[in-house]
Image (cartoon, helix red, strand yellow):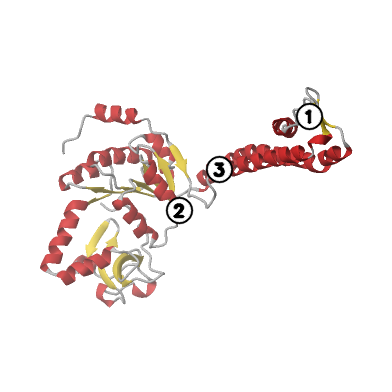
Amino acid sequence: MKLPGQDAIARNADERHVTHQVRLPKREIERPIRQVGKRLAMAMFVLVATAFIVYADNEGYNDNSDGSVDLLDAFYYATVTLSTTGYGDITPVSDAARFTNIFVITPLRVLFLIILVGTTLEVLTERTREEWRLNRWRAALREHTVVVGWGTKGRSAVQTVCATGLRKEQVVVVDPSSKAIEAATSEGYTGVIGDATRSDVLLRAELQKARQIIISTARDDTAVLVALTARQLNRGAKIVAAVREEENAPLLKQSGADVVITSASAAGRLLGLSVLSPAAGMVMEDLIQQGSGLDIAERPVIKAEVGRGVRETEDLVVSVLRGHRVLGYDDPSIGRLQLTDRLITIVRATPSTKITPETKHLP
């Protein structure tokens, strides 16, 4: 594999100047611009209403400059009155005008101030609430899944894992594109905008506390750098990565990935199998689509199965996990099932079907 110089990669990463921002799942709230626009419209309505009320009773007001109050003077009086400036050059002199000031102008003044001050307080409150929500999220996040790259592969991987019982709150998506993160947060996932080859971006995703990491970047060299950085920050997490070229898979494993999937060759093999046997291709497509039809599931050996052979279980067993080894169903070394074994089985998909994460890393 021909990797670009690491100096060039670091320089390109620095030139991007991406804001490292954590975005929690979106809530159904009105856009801030629309909220401010509504409040400004309400404030202008109060101002215009006050001006016309004053102009309707202009004979009850006295202007120190010329003695009369026209429409412009009415708007001027409404502006200085609602803003509590009060220069005193235009004053109510009749009983009716003073009565209107007491029971109409003063409530409108209070409403005007509530609209303007309330907007500022709401913005400050929203920022405080979001900061508190982010701190609570960081404190509660444990044993989660970090997905690097929110493309077709990353989205499909998360959908497959969530179909087995993983909650969306336990998924953090890292991607340099703000549009990709916006799409992830709209689906209920937490997103971090930034370059995943940088350790500070991965730390914002709390990768050091993650249980599993899915690397689904568009470039193989980026996947290698992400795997190196992720393994340095988290020695115990399981790292699963996807590469385009099969020749890059060994390098990615050396970088710290536990499992490497070659997307191009896997798709090619599925295409070839479908040509040779369309039915077999349909079965394989069904198996890799989690949550429908047939699923591949991992489960522990129950006590009633201890001492039995692989073919004596109720499920269709395809492999046995014993220690660090993955043994095929026809491997003679399996012998009798042990209580510490785990079984890879093919089952009919049901709401209770789950793939239990293994407790040990496999080679």
Residue lying at 71% horizontally and 34% vertically, measured from the top left = 71
Residue count near mark 1 (Cα–Cα under 10 Å), binned few <14, some 14–19, many ≥20:
some
SS label for mark 2: loop
Residue count near mark 3 (Cα–Cα under 10 Å), binned few <14, some 14–19, many ≥20:
some
In space, the residues marked 2 and 3 are separated at their CA atoms by 16 Å
Q: Residue 45: image x %, image y %?
A: 66, 42
Q: Is residue 227 above or below residue 309?
A: above
Which one is earlier in the sequence, the residue at label 1 or at label 3? 1
Please say whether residue 189 is visible from this viewpoint. Answer: no
Q: Quadrant of the N terminus?
A: top left
Residue lying at 28% horizontally and 53% vertically, measured from the top left = 362
Residue lying at 31% horizontally and 77% vertically, measured from the top left = 314
In space, the residues marked 1 and 3 are separated at their CA atoms by 53 Å
The reply to whether callout 1 and callout 3 are in contact (CB within 8 Å) is: no
Outermost residue toward the left?
276
Disc 2: which residue: 188
Please say whether residue 197 is visible from this viewpoint. Answer: yes
Q: Is residue 324 above or below residue 313?
A: above
Q: Nearer the viewer, residue 298 or 353?
A: 353
Q: Amino acid at mark 1?
A: Ser
Disc 1: which residue: 68
Q: Residue 204: image x %, image y %?
A: 44, 39
Which one is earlier in the sequence, the residue at label 1 or at label 2? 1
Outermost residue toward the top?
65
Question: Which numbered disc, 1 or 3, marks the residue closer to the eye?
Answer: 1
